[in-house]
Amino acid sequence: MNLENYFPVLLFILVGIGVGVAPQILGRILGPHNPDDQKLSPYECGFEAFEDARMKFDVRYYLVAILFILFDLEVAFLVPWAAAMREVGMPGFWAMMIFLGILTIGLVFEWKKGALDWE
């Protein structure tokens, strides 16, 4: 078995480690170090840590996060559609209008149900 055949794999691993570790080391060396009480306080999931880690969060937090991801991903479909608009023609245009109509109806439904209200 010839170990020279594994040199590209070793090089790939070393470059990957370098790309992952070098920015952290540079940030630690070159970055400012002036922590204060507020910066050092625990903060997690949009809520101040004031009880134990097993407390229940309000379901609205998760609902807003899921709705953001849902609508964000659906809007991402607009980029390839816009790039291929000449190729898809009028049938593609009307298919996207139906998609956007369904998306708008879903957004209005969520808005009317109060799922986007943060109290």
Image: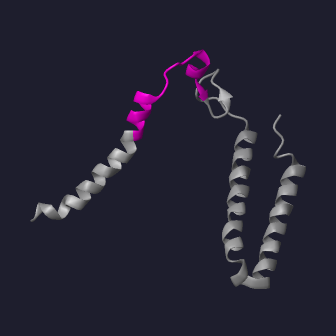
The residue at the far right in this view is 112
Of residues 93 and 111, the one drawn nearer to the viewer in this rendering: 93
Q: How are the residues colored? A: one colour
Find residue 2 and report its horizontal and vertical position in percent: 10, 64
Find residue 97 and report its horizontal and vertical position in percent: 82, 73
The residue at the far left in this view is 1
Vertical relation: 109 (above or below) 21: below
The answer to which image quadrant residue 107 occupies is bottom right
Of residues 112 and 94, the one drawn nearer to the viewer in this rendering: 94
The answer to which image quadrant residue 75 occupies is bottom right
Find residue 69 and report its horizontal and vertical position in percent: 68, 53
Q: Residue at the location (71% across, 72% down)?
A: 82
Quadrant location of the C terminus? top right
| Count of labels in the image | 0
Q: Residue at the location (38% across, 47% down)?
A: 19
Find residue 11 and report its horizontal and vertical position in percent: 25, 55
Vertical relation: 58 (above or below) 43: below
Q: Residue at the location (55% across, 20% down)?
A: 40
Quadrant location of the N terminus? bottom left
Left or right: residue 89 compared with residue 16: right
Of residues 65 and 80, the one drawn nearer to the viewer in this rendering: 80
Left or right: residue 63 compared with residue 49: right
Q: Residue at the location (82% across, 45% down)?
A: 116
Vertical relation: 118 (above or below) 88: above
Q: Which residues are magenta?
A: 23-43
Left or right: residue 99 compared with residue 47: right
Q: Is residue 26 magenta?
A: yes
Q: Is residue 31 magenta?
A: yes
The residue at the far front in this view is 30
Left or right: residue 32 compared with residue 93: left
